[in-house]
Amino acid sequence: MEKDSSKYPQLAKDDEALKDEIFALLSVHANPNPYSDDGAFARAIGKLPRGLRAMAATHFLDLSLTLDSLTWHFGNFGEPGLVDHTEAGLHELGLHELAECFHEARNLMTPLLADRKEEDGDSNDILERKGLLEVADQLNQRAWALHPITKSKKATESSVIYAAWISYARKNPENVFDL
């Protein structure tokens, strides 16, 4: 059931405008470097309402699935606190199958990347040396099937994650906009 837009005027907006409103909130409240290993991004989003926190954490997974892959994601956004928030965020947003896939990728990638040095190369190099490229490819294929990339110019139509943000925000605005 959608909430009353008198308390949450954002809900009167169309989906794209609502997504833009969420991005505006994230740009203010989730601005430490998400690529950093220092945990600052995870700490910052940990203070947000649970829905907005889920959105902050899953935004970078959406980017990884669109531009790279699920397993590659951990090489860029593998800080443990952010990984925890991302998995919890997928569940919060109702993306349980994608959360399971993410969990499996986490179990594969976290130990491989734990002691990575620059000379080890990227995550694909490490997977290849360990004989795990096929396992990683299967996980990536499952994730892409759950998050198909379409050619729509509207993010809410081209992204399962962003569509989940909109649906969630309309059903639970207090978990997104009550800062």
Image (cartoon, helix red, strand yellow):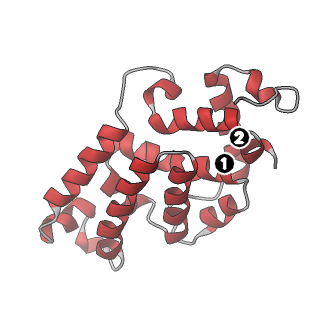
Helix, strand or loop at mark 2: loop
In the image, taking residue 126 as reference, residue 35 lies left or right, namely right
Q: Amino acid at mark 1?
A: Gly
Residue that badge 2 annotates: 172
Residue that badge 1 annotates: 51
Q: Give the percent coordinates (x, y) of residue 69.
A: 31, 48
Dot 1 crowding, Cα within 10 Å, few <14, some 14–19, many 20+: many
Q: Give the percent coordinates (x, y) of residue 152.
A: 43, 20
Q: Residue at x 49, y 68 (%)?
A: 79
Decide: is 3 above or below 69: above
Q: Residue at x 51, y 51 (%)?
A: 90
Q: Residue at x 26, y 53 (%)?
A: 139
Quadrant of the image occupied by residue 66:
top left
> Which of the two discs, 1 and 2, labels the residue nearer the N terminus?
1
Helix, strand or loop at mark 1: helix
Decide: is 51 above or below 149: below
Q: Residue at x 14, y 64 (%)?
A: 128
Dot 2 crowding, Cα within 10 Å, few <14, some 14–19, many 20+: some
Q: Mark 1–mark 2 contact, CB under 8 Å?
A: yes
In the image, taking residue 108 as reference, residue 34 lies left or right, namely right
Q: Give the percent coordinates (x, y) of residue 131.
A: 11, 68
